[in-house]
Image (tube, coloured by chain):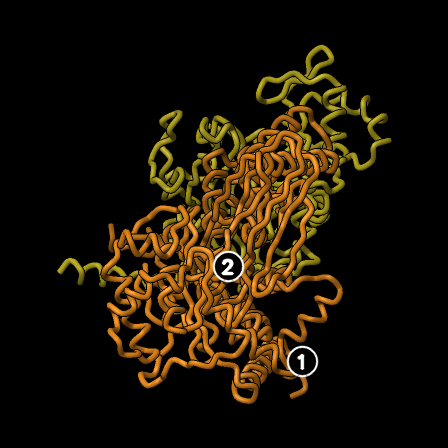
Amino acid sequence: MKLQQLWKVFREGMQNVPKVMGMNRRNLAYVYPNNPRRNFEYANDKLLTKRTLEHAGLNIPKTYFSVSYFYELTQIEAELRRLSSFVIKPASGSGGNGIVVIVDYDEGRWISISGKEYSFEMIKKHIADTIFGVFSFGLNDTAIIEERVVQDERITVLSPQGLADIRMINYKGKNVKAMLRIATEASDGKANLHQGGIGLAIDLESGKSFSAQIERENVTHHPDTGVVLLDVAIPYWKELVVLCEAVAEVIPMGYLGIDIAISEQGLVVLEVNARPGIEIQNIADEGMIERLESIEKGLKCLV
Amino acid sequence: MFKYLKSAPFLYQLSLFVLLSITASLMSYKLFVLDYELADLIPTVGYEVEVSMQVSGHGEKVSLSTYLPQTSMYQSISEERNSPDIFTTQIKVDGLNRIISWQAPNVKETHIVRYRYFAQPEHVKYKIDKDIVIEKELPKYLFSYIQEEEGVQVHDPLIAATITKLFGEKEPDTYTALYTIHNYLQHSFENRNFSGFTDALTALKLQEASCNGKSRLFIALTRHLGLPSRLVGGLILNPGSKKTSHQWVEVYVKGHWIPFDAINNYFAEIPKNYLRLYYGDKVLFKHSANINFQYLFHISKKLVPRKEMRETMYASPLNAFNMYKIFESIGISQNLLKIILMIPLGALVVVIFRNVIGFETFGTFLPALIATAARETGLWWGLAGFFFIILISALLRKFLDYLQLLHSPKMAVMLTVVVILMMLMTIFAVQSSMFDLAHISLFPIAILAITAERFAIIQEEQGFLKALRISFFTAVVIMAAYAVMSSHFMNSLIIAFPELLLFLIVLNLWLGKWVGMRLSEFVRFRKLIFKAER
């Protein structure tokens, strides 16, 4: 009897296998055919991403200036001292490496979001490191100095420890799945799922959260604040859905992860990812193949 | 039509077809036209023998000598390596034997001389016909084998009396003579396990003896009957370390030297693990007086390709070995080639672990390369050395990070430290006589430095536990790649049929199009797949 049950679980499980996307399938069936290698730049070079989106009239964090060459470092001081809050980002960095968030300027010194004080020399050193590729695997890089995104109060309630962002998977211009990534104390203020951040699955139609997970365990409340996570409506959802489709239109790749922050002023596109992860299926408690295939079918009908 | 011929799916299928047919036709040519035997691919047992001699002197001239085994129809000796320490070596052939001697003019303190070889003795068994009479007229060159010599008192009255006791007045045929003497020594004598010299008469009087006493008595009795016989000195090859050598007897019958071991009861037969070192009544080791001398044999079992396999391949024109000889002519040894040829197989193992099983490892082919290097150090030393180097250099990387260096110079520092670590490990290994570990310097240095960097980055970004997990998976894949790459079957197979590399490409082409779920993803997405579980 026991064995029969196991066999049944196994047989039904095997029927579910084609609904779940694995790494091999993501790469072979979605990334390689839809994201040509030469267009990876649109995701990997954040300056190019920003220029492309800005050109299309889409909202991005404003770029104050960028530094690509060592000699430019002598010319940035005056410009920098006019700014009391900004973000330094490597244009080709990944995983949040080398990002410094400055929130205040006081008596010639800047204060970062974690409370660390920065002199001009320290900022210059960080930018120099970025240019020499310390944060991007030895490649020469560009440092982007951009506007700091201050997030919408309604999102801050959900993610008081740091900037939360929406990750949307988009296939050939159609949205596939969405989640909100929330920072926690355990994730050290980064909205990073494999470091203890919360993944909050959002329903595409209603824009409401329906499932939350921390490291694959289902939760209902924020572990640090106790705020309820489920059935929360994400502000600007209708606009967000349209924005993602607009991003997919201008970025010349067919299978994308689009990261969007919800700021005080509205929606801001943070980044585009050409190899979006597949963990979103666990967060949403549903495989994504069926949705991808129905999109494919819908497109064929249109043609 | 033309468009289809240029399309990716067609070219993919065409590549598979072309590669498969080349592989299949080359293999069938070898199997059916050149008569390669598949059964010969199954490896056979051989023994790695090391004799180490420790000498302590006080500044005097020292010489040592011993007998080296020779390749004959009963045994094959290969891969001989001499580690003479401070001594100069000389090898000479003396009659049937090969003698190696080491000399040094001024020996102070302790020195160790090592000699290693690979030995594959054969099982030998004869059937002696019952009607062979003992020949009265012997050719001249056999005279010395029926004469009396020191310790073998052929004409002593006691020996004569024993012969009369065993056979009466009748003259026995060869078979009866040997059978009776063998059984007499086997059953009426106690085996004694001491290493001193026992002559034939003493053994007879005491009715007990070690191998040399029994063998001398065997020789005295057979020679008394006119059967030419001689002593054989050698080693019984069992894995482990030992000091004891062994002696047995060979008797000349109708053009063959037939072996007998009255201690271990082998009649006209010796087993597969008897290694012949010398013929005649000799002392295995000789050394100058007034020095402290110790020796030890160390024996380990190894599986190797069959001799027949090697011979068939040497004989054929389209054969792998002739191809390998081209490489040998520019100094690339066959052993190195064998290792190089196995790397694609290791790579396939890594691909299977990464894309089918879903193991995350450091570097794409790092496990295959470490497994390759571990063939010299042995698997466990290889793994230990690998993780020691990675851990130390990851710690160093943390320190360098604190100094905030640029990427390339930082990596150069790590590389240098890896080199220094490997040198230190080699010196340490040699000092403490761990010669396998000493081969650690064959590790791919640059790849180790990059791996240490990866380890440190993962440790920083995703935590120490994650880095340990990946290390564990890497170790598992190294072990799997090692097992496959050092399998003698695979070795023989690829050396005999190097065209199988094309088949490996086919497998990779197929795996490169495989969109199935990785095994690890069944675990990762178990909630989505096995919904009924809840």
The residue that mark 2 highlights is: B277
Q: Report, in whole angstroms, how far the alpha carbon at label 2 lies from the one at label 1.
A: 67 Å
Report which colour depicts chain B.
orange
The residue that mark 1 highlights is: B6
The x and y percentages for residue A183 are 48, 32
- Label 1: state its secondary structure: helix
Report which colour depicts chain A.
yellow
The x and y percentages for residue A218 are 34, 40
- Label 2: state its secondary structure: strand
Q: Specify which label sits upstream in the sequence, 2 or 1.
A: 1
- Amino acid at the residue labelled 2: Leu
Residue B414 visible in the displayed image? no
Residue lying farthest front? B157
Image quadrant holding the N terminus of chain B, namely bottom right
Residue B399 visible in the displayed image? yes
Choose mark 2 or mark 1, whichever is in front: 2
Q: Chain of mark 1?
A: B
Left or right, B259 with reference to B277 = left
Count numbered badges in the picture: 2
In this rendered view, identify the residue nearer to me: B285 or B12: B285
- Snapshot quadrant of residue B388: top right
